[in-house]
Image (cartoon, rainbow, N blue to C red):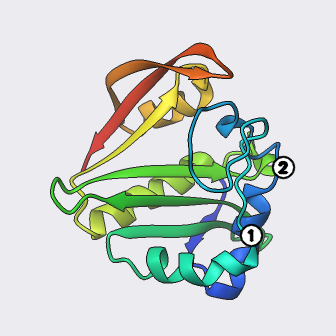
Amino acid sequence: MKQIQLVRPQLADLWFRRDCMSDPQTMAYNAGYDVSYDGYHYETGCIDFSEEKWGEWYETKLKNPNFFYAYIQDVDTGDYVGYVNFNKDKTTGKATMGIVIKAEFQGKGYMRPAMQKLILEAEKLGVAALTDTVPESRDHALKVFYSLGFLKVGEFTGKKFNKPEVVAEIEKEL
């Protein structure tokens, strides 16, 4: 298993987030959805994250006690390989979560250890459950989630590039 650690970035380290979010191969999973957030590119899934936005994002996200965000760092090489996050709902205690592995590191065994560490962080911060929505077509990701104790609690049909897509709603109680 890959030896990784989760590293909370400093403001100057947000270049890695920008690089991930501007890479069409990394962000391909995110392409083709009808969403309206600022800087989203429908064709590639990329999201603009220019340096001018770093300070505000750092202040509103990384200093928010209900938001956890960290880079996944390979202990042996020192490389950042992706990032994980969750946002805890103050009312329910549940947290929506995410994981992004940079394209060049996908399929190399980083997801499982990163998710294990994210689960530990969520437990430390009193999260009641981690939740996510994952297209059924991302069967490798779902296989990892299910092996870590996530359960499918529902599904819905969304649209990706205007074609129907079945999306699993998953949850792990902590």
Instruction: Residue 8: name its quadrant.
Output: bottom right
- The residue at 43%/51% (across/down) is 97
Number of the front mark, 1 or 2? 1
* Residue 73 at x, y percent in the picture: 67, 68
Q: Where is mark 1, residue-wise?
A: 16
User: As displayed, is residue 166 above or below residue 69?
Assistant: above
Residue 14 vertical position relative to residue 45 in the rendered view, above or below: below
Q: Within 10 angstroms of label 2, few (less than 14), some, or many (20 or more) residues? A: few
Classed neighbour count for the residue bearing mark 1: other residues with Cα under 10 Å, few (<14), some (14–19), many (≥20): some
Report the amino acid beneath label 1. Phe
Q: Earlier in the sequence, mark 1 or mark 2?
A: 1
**What residue lies at 61% left-to-right and 56% top-to-bottom?**
38
How many numbered marks have been drawn onto this rendered protein structure? 2
Front-most of residues 69 and 24: 24
Q: Is residue 99 above or below residue 152?
A: below
Give coordinates of residue 124: x percent, y percent. 29, 69
Q: Secondary structure at mark 2?
A: helix
Q: Amino acid at mark 2?
A: Glu
Q: Residue 82: give x, y in percent of width and height.
A: 67, 58
Identify the mark at residue 144; answer none if there is no mark: none
Name the residue that disc number 2 marks.
104
Element at badge 1?
Answer: helix
Q: Quadrant of residue 28?
A: top right
Q: Badges 1 and 2: C-beta atoms under 8 Å apart?
A: no
Q: CA distance from mark 1 to mark 2?
A: 13 Å
